[in-house]
Amino acid sequence: MSKAGSVGAGSKGEAKGGGGKAKSSGTTNVSMPCVLKYLTPDVLASAIIGKGGAVIQNIRTSTNAKIGLTDHGEVYPTTDARVLTAQANSEESLNEVSKQIVKILAEHVQSSGPTEAVGSDGDFKIKALVPRAAVGGVIGKGGATIKQIRETSGARVSISEPIGSGPAAEQIVSISGSSEALEYVLVEVNKQIQMLNTEAWFAQWASSNNVVPAGGGNAAMMGYGASTMPMHLGGPTYSSPGINTMIQVAQGLPPYVMEDSRGFALSCVVPNRLVGGLIGRGGAGTKEVQMLTGTKIGIREIPDDPDNRSLNIAGPLANTCAAYMMMMKRYLDAEAQSASAPAAAGSGAAR
């Protein structure tokens, strides 16, 4: 029997960790063809596991699915949520898993009260991790499919920018609404994922969970699941008053601002002479910022302005602001390097 993510009825590891231990850091054993992944905050993960692992074992038995949770203290980057991986031999079994998870979510909210993580009675929240290729099916041509899903279900659905590139790049689908609305959207998401389960990249996506230690210095992007930002904030106050202002404003915004699925864009003008420093050798600079923040960055020519170019950043609001700050650091570094270069050349000539 596989050690991780397997059906194993009531083993010690499963009772404690809610689904068995991963076979190695960041991976889960997958042996069934259909896979669906959820983000579960601690309160939801605890409710799914149940006392002595009884609830999760009942889900496994009744749905014929294998269910694994990352260990307590292992969370998806920039969130406080553990990754729950469900696998089964059929799409229908995973739909039943979703139905039972939504039922547990609703019962928890009704008994324990509303929280930001799981919503309020009648307006519940759940998130799924979806490969980029399947997100395309969820959105549909010109956004037609996601519009139909929203209108039919009454759910609010937002989708984060992908982390990484390629069809397996992960995106967070955030769903809010009634129990029925959550179930409807999860069925549609599941359908799009399982349509791709024979693709070459699918097995790798299915077995990866990309978790990091909780509280490991991640700058949370309001649930967008961007890659970990290299910020070490280290305390409640900061040397620059502007940082305090930025954090206070971000914390005071209602969730719908950060979760708007349309995304946001920032643009500025940069001198042509600094573009090389901004981009980095072989584009490494902008690629790194894109990977860290989950944004898209482009530098384009400006018509009738040969001396300058336009720097454009697009993505979820918090991610876009973070990317802008990182690019401004590169701008200042490139500017300083450009200023020092003539002086160095002049010094060499004097010799």
Image (cartoon, rainbow, N blue to C red):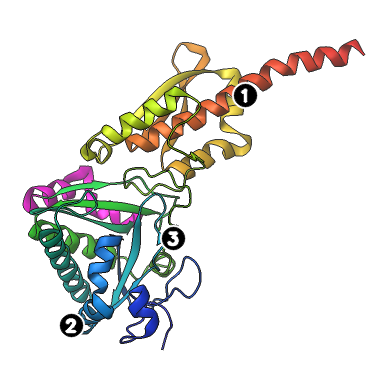
Disc 3 marks which amino acid?
A: Val
User: Magenta segment: does it hold 143?
Assistant: yes
Category of crowding for the residue at label 2, using alpha-carbon neighbours closer than 10 angstroms: few (below 14), some (14–19), many (at least 20):
few
Q: Looking at the picture, how far across and down is residue 213, in whole percent?
A: 46, 58
Task: Determine which of the numbered discs, if any, sits on residue 211 in the image.
Answer: 3
Q: Nearer the viewer, residue 68 or 204?
A: 68
> The magenta stretch spans which residues?
131-154
At mark 1, the secondary structure is helix
Q: Closer to the N terminus: mark 2 or mark 3?
A: 2
Above/below status of 277 relative to 212:
above
Q: Position of residue 138 (x, y in %)?
A: 23, 53
Q: Label 2 belongs to which residue? A: 62
| Crowd band around label 1 with a 10 angstrom C-alpha radius: few (<14), some (14–19), many (20+) | many
Choose top left, top right, bottom left or bottom right for residue 335.
top right
**Which residue shows up at 89% across the image and 10% down it?**
350
The mark lying in front, picked from 1 and 3, is 3
Q: Nearer the viewer, residue 33 or 226?
A: 226
The Cα–Cα distance between marks 2 and 3, rounded to whole angstroms, is 28 Å
Quadrant in the picture for the N terminus? bottom left
Question: Considering the numbered disc 2 on the image, is that residue within a helix, a strand or a loop?
Answer: helix
Disc 1 to disc 3, how far (Cα)? 34 Å
